[in-house]
Amino acid sequence: MANSLYQRLAISVTLTFALLGYLFFWWSSSLAQHSQFQAEQKLHIELAEHLAQDNPLLQDGVYDKPALENLFHTLMLLGPAFEFYFLDPSGKILTYSAKPDKIKRKSVDLTPISQLIDAPHQVPIFGDDPRHLSRKKIFSAAPVYKGEKLQGYLYVIIGGEIYDSTYAKVKSDQQLLEHLSLLGGSLLLLLILLLMLFRSFTSPIRRLVRDINNIRDANFDQEKISLNHWRANSATTADQALTEAAYDEGKESTKQNEVEQLGANFVAMVEQINSQFQQLKHNDKIRRELLAHLSHDLRTPLAAMKGYVETLSLKNEELNSEQRQQYINTALRNVEQLKLLIDQIFELAHLEDGQVSVNNEAFAVGELLHDIIAKFALKAQQKHINLSLLPDHCERVVYSDIAKLERILTNLIENALRHTPENGNISVQITPVNDKLRISVVDTGTGIHQKDLAYIFDARYRASNAQGEKNRHAGLGLAISKRLSQLLNSDLSVTSELGKGSAFSLTLAQAS
């Protein structure tokens, strides 16, 4: 059973050519036979008239049958391709040249005879064949008169039984076979050329099927196989000529090979799938590493809480009120650290899931920054850090998500407070950049080593300058800020110099 496209096309074309060959042969044979009948009838159209005029016996008609039969016999010997019949005025056959057992009709329809006598130029005209009940033959006919009295008709069949049998033999001779062989060979050659053309047309489809089967067998791993190269904008020479002609006329032409486009899209799809597979593997690796780091961060406060609670449980009577309160405060700090870590884990997971909605609105960014700085003013004062807004008064209006922007700036200022020593400075700076507004959190803290800058937004990475309050720092604040800035169609960037401080910046669109 034919399954491939090429096999189905080959079978369809072969059957079509066989049918066309048969129809062409039948049509050419019919046309040749029609032309032959027309030529022969024109050639012998006056035969009956001449015989009627040159033979007085015909004018005697039915009154001398033996002599008339003898005359027909003699004429048929002279012209074996003809059969002679004498009809009465009603069309009844009176005498003939054939053997009696061959005659199947007793009369002949006179309508074709009248047509031939009245309009001899409208040949071929077919009349009844007395040897057959339904067959028609070309003929020559002439009326026979005795004086002015119609005696009947001389009816001559052109191409009688002897002629038909002889012609049938001639049709099977070597010359006819050579012509038929030439015709058949030409059709066969054309069929082979078309099959080769179809094979060329279907070759890209077979290549694409092989690619699909290979990538499936390789479990969609592109690294295990080599896919075919496909040209997305390929076109034939004729297509290119048409394209150039259309271009010269100021028109556009987009003729392309659809199979090549399909192949190119398939390769692009496979590359995308493999890229996503690699990304999934990478994300899974990061997830495992992140869980390993977070499990360590979770165990640290849990172990501390457990230790202090066990101490309170075992030595409660031995501890004085001051020691007991100190143990309780330490356990509470670890509980807060554990809660902060868990909250950040859930927040980061929520951001990574991509289901976070963004509610942009126009608002005065100066008011938001004053509120955020006021929230950290007491903590900065306790650490003797100068926290300021530059410029102090700003009337700029931005179009963004106010809640997410506040979360980003809160994380950045918390991070700056952790890494800025006493008597340091932290400033939130607003700088116009073309039609946007850049907000930067600049500190004079410990700074970040250059080798750490590329990794500080990684959720599982802890920079080498993590110090001081690092036991209360979960290491996820910058990762969360980075994801939030991407949701705001911005990008959180950092510049830093070890021992001199850092600057975190993001740009926002201004409201029109």
Image (spheres, grey):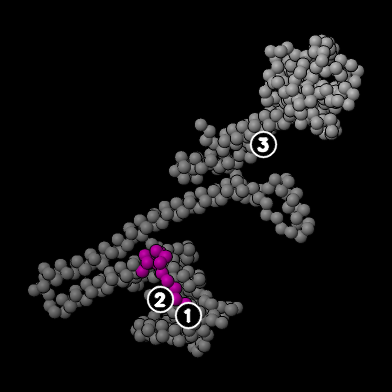
- Element on which disc 3 rests: helix
Amino acid carrying label 1: it is Glu
At 78% from the left and 58% from the top, the residue drawn is 249
Contact (Cβ within 8 Å) of mark 1 with mark 2:
no
Q: Which residue is mark 2?
A: 407
| Residue 167 location (% of width, % of height) | 76, 17
> Dot 1, how many residues are within 10 Å of its Cα: few (below 14), some (14-19), or many (20+)?
few
- Element on which disc 2 rests: helix
Q: Report the magenta residues as a range.
A: 347-361
Q: Is residue 189 magenta?
A: no
Give the CA distance from mark 3 to mark 2: 67 Å
Q: Which residue is mark 3?
A: 197
- In the picture, the disc for residue 361 is 1
> Of tags 1 and 2, which is closer to the observer?
1
> Of tags 3 and 2, which is closer to the observer?
3
Give the CA distance from mark 1 to mark 3: 63 Å
- Could you tell whether 217 is left or right of 100 in the image? left
At 47% from the left and 65% from the top, the residue drawn is 453
Amino acid carrying label 2: it is Arg
> Dot 3, how many residues are within 10 Å of its Cα: few (below 14), some (14-19), or many (20+)?
few
For residue 466, say whether it is visible. no
Which of the marked residues, 3 or 2, is nearer the chain's N terminus? 3
Quadrant of residue 460 in the image?
Answer: bottom left
| Residue 246 location (% of width, % of height) | 75, 55
- Could you tell whether 75 is left or right of 327 in the image? right
Which quadrant would the C terminus be assigned to in this image? bottom right
